[in-house]
Structures are given as structure tokens and as C-alpha cells.
Amino acid sequence: MLAELEQLKARAFSELDVIDNLKHLEEWRLRYLGRKGSLTLVLRGLSGLPLEERRVVGAAANEIKAALEAGLKQKQDSLKEQSLAVALQKSRIDVTLPGYPVNVGRFHPTTQTIREVCAVFASMGFQVIEGPEVEWDYYNFEALNIPRDHPARDMWATLWVEAPEGENPMLLRTHTSPMQIRLMEKTRPPVRAVIPGKTYRYEATDATHESMFYQIEGLAVDRGITMGDLKGTLFEFARRVFGEERRARFRCDYFPFVEPGVEMAIDCWVCRGKGCRLCGNTGWIEILGAGMVHPQVLRRVDYDPDVYSGFAFGVGVERIPMLRYGIEDIRLFYGNDLRFLKQF
Ligand code: YSA
């Protein structure tokens, strides 16, 4: 009997040695120490033995039981340790590795320009307001002295919005000038405001023309405002935005809602005034239209033109960064190409 117990012990330990997972360890426990395990059966059978033999075999069996239980505990601990080590190895973090770069967003160059230009005018006492992009024919044309059959409508190739029969025609505003009327309808002089926003034109695109582009409208109305105020304000704007070294030029132009009307141009960014393909060999790039608000427009909003006068202007926003950074094609602004946009 004692020899059998020794064999059982040897077998149990040699099996335990090669066990490498908790599932097999549990099977091993049941095989030897479980309720129907080999050692348990030996212990149960002791009662049939003579007293002397029972004492010897019993003591030996209990000793083996204690040894197997200690072996079991040791194996359990070492298997748990191993699986913890594997888990730690898998989830190991190398804190010395460089982190992933964070993508930092930025404002679109058009937005940057609008903010900068508005800040320049704000410092000269102009407030900043906004208005609708889908506009009535009345504000975009009629109230600006451009009646329905006036040939000047051709200057603003228009995208019309389908309106029900008999309704007032609507359109995508072709310039920000309708906001002059909306503002003056609501306010009494003195008025000083800049109005940035999107404008739309039904025209083919080229290096300096888009069908959707931004303008910033400016309007100042008060007693005694003259052409000198217009020129002084716009020269100051040009100086602050483009720098002292750039040249600005005023020339007569025609807009039905001003009298007199002017355009302002800056020396071409490619040829610096010498003449090239981009500026049509003129050496200048037009950036804005302006003029003294027409008395007819003032009357329309109940301002007495014998008391009040004012100037207004509309500047193309994209042309400002084009002039400053030498960008040769306006279509780059809205091509959604990060290689271009990330430069600003
Ligand atoms: C004139 C007199 C005022 O009292 C007030 C405003 C104006 C400007 C007028 N409303 C207007 O829209 N004139 S404009 O057709 O010559 O455009 C003004 C500026 O917008 C241009 O000088 C140019 O810089 C820009 N622009 C015009 N068409 C464009 C454009 N920019 C990009 N793409 C286009 N298709």
C-alpha cells in the first residue's frame, strides 16, 4: 500500500511539472485531490485496514496530500504570475516614444483677411455687421439705382433664385452693396459700417475671377463727408494692409449708386507695375469699387441729400492675400487643397 502511495505521488508530481495552464491544473486537482480523486479514495479506504496499518498508511497518505496541495498552490501562483507577465508585456507602453503629432486647425486665408481688414476699419470707428446672401431684387438692384431694364445690370451676371409667379424676384447677391440699403433703412446718420460676406456671380472663372467670392462693403454717411474722406480712409486701409511700399491708384469708374464713382487698384504683385499677363499688361490689379453715395440712394432711405453725404466701397477679399503673397490664381482658395491652405 505504501509503495502504491509513493507511485501515486511520483506520478502526480511528474504530471504537475508539465502543466502549463490553469485549465489543466484544475483537471489535475480533480484527478488527485477531488472528491473522487485517487488520493481521496485511498484515504476513504483506510477504514478497512487493520489499526496498525491504518495508522502508518494514513500518516503517509496525509503527508502526500499536504505535499500535493502545496505543489498545487505553488503551480497556481507561478501560472498566475506568468499570465500576468504576458498581459503586461502585451500592454506595455514605451513612454520614451514620441507622441502622435496633433493636427492644429487654423482659419482659412479668406477668414484671416476678413478679420484683419475689419479690425483696420474698426480702429477707424466702423462697426462690423452681416446680412443675407439670398436677396431681393429690390435691395441688390432697384434701391441701388439700377432699375429692371437698366443696362448696368449686365455688370453683375446674376444667379436668380426661382420664385413663385407674382412674387418679388430673388437672387444670390452679386455684391455686398444691398446691405447699404438695409442698414440705412434701419439707422439714422451718422453711419459707419463694414459688411463682409459671400457674393455670387454667374460668370466663367479665371485667375482673378471666381463665381463665389467674398466682398467687404464699407459705408460712411454723415454731415459734410467728402471725396477727401473717401480717399484718406482707403489710402489708410491700403497702407495698413499692404504696407508703405505698395502703390495704390484711384481712377474714375461707373456705378449707378455713386456719383462720382472710382476704382482703386494696387500695383501688380507679379510684375510690380511693369505689366504682365496677370494684370493684362496694365501693371495694376483692381481691388475695389467706391464712390460718393448717390443722392437718389440717400432719398430712397429718407436721408436728405442736402444735409447728409457719404462714401461707400466694395472690396474683393481674395484679391488682398493674392496681392500680399503673390498668389497667382484665385481658384486655389476654394480647391480644398490642404497643401495650399496650410501655408497661411
Ligand atoms: C462700388 C461703389 C460703392 O459705393 C460700393 C461698392 C462698390 C462695389 C460694387 N458693389 C461692386 O461689386 N463692384 S465690382 O463688381 O467691381 O466688384 C468689387 C470688387 O470685387 C472688385 O474690385 C474685385 O476685387 C472683386 N471682384 C469682382 N468680381 C469678382 C471679384 N473677385 C473675385 N471674383 C470675381 N468674379
Image: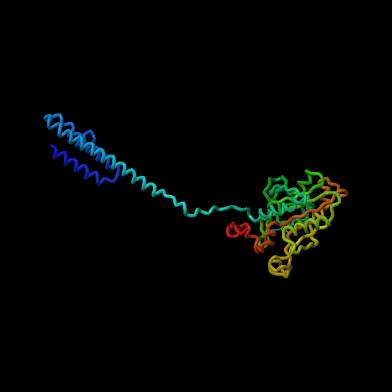
Q: Quadrant of residue 5?
A: top left
Left or right, 228 with respect to 44, comes to right
Residue 303 shows in the view: yes
Quarter in which the C terminus is drawn: bottom right
User: Which sits in the foreground, 115 or 90?
Assistant: 90
Ligand 1's image quarter is: bottom right
Quarter in which the N terminus is drawn: top left
Left or right, 120 with respect to 34, comes to right
Residue located at (17% from left, 33% from top): 58
Residue located at (76% from left, 46% from top): 183
Residue 123 horizontal/vertical position (percent)? 75, 51
Which residue sits furthest right? 306
In this view, 201 is above or below 79:
below
Residue located at (73% from left, 61% from top): 243
Which colour style is shown? Answer: rainbow
Residue 309 horizontal/vertical position (percent)? 84, 51
Residue 151 shows in the view: no
User: Which sits in the foreground, 280 or 39?
Assistant: 39
Residue 215 horizontal/vertical position (percent)? 71, 54
Q: Quadrant of residue 302?
A: top right
In this view, 61 is above or below 256:
above
Left or right, 203 with respect to 143, comes to left
User: Which sits in the foreground, 245 or 257?
Assistant: 245
User: Which sits in the foreground, 63 or 174?
Assistant: 63
Which residue sits furthest left? 50
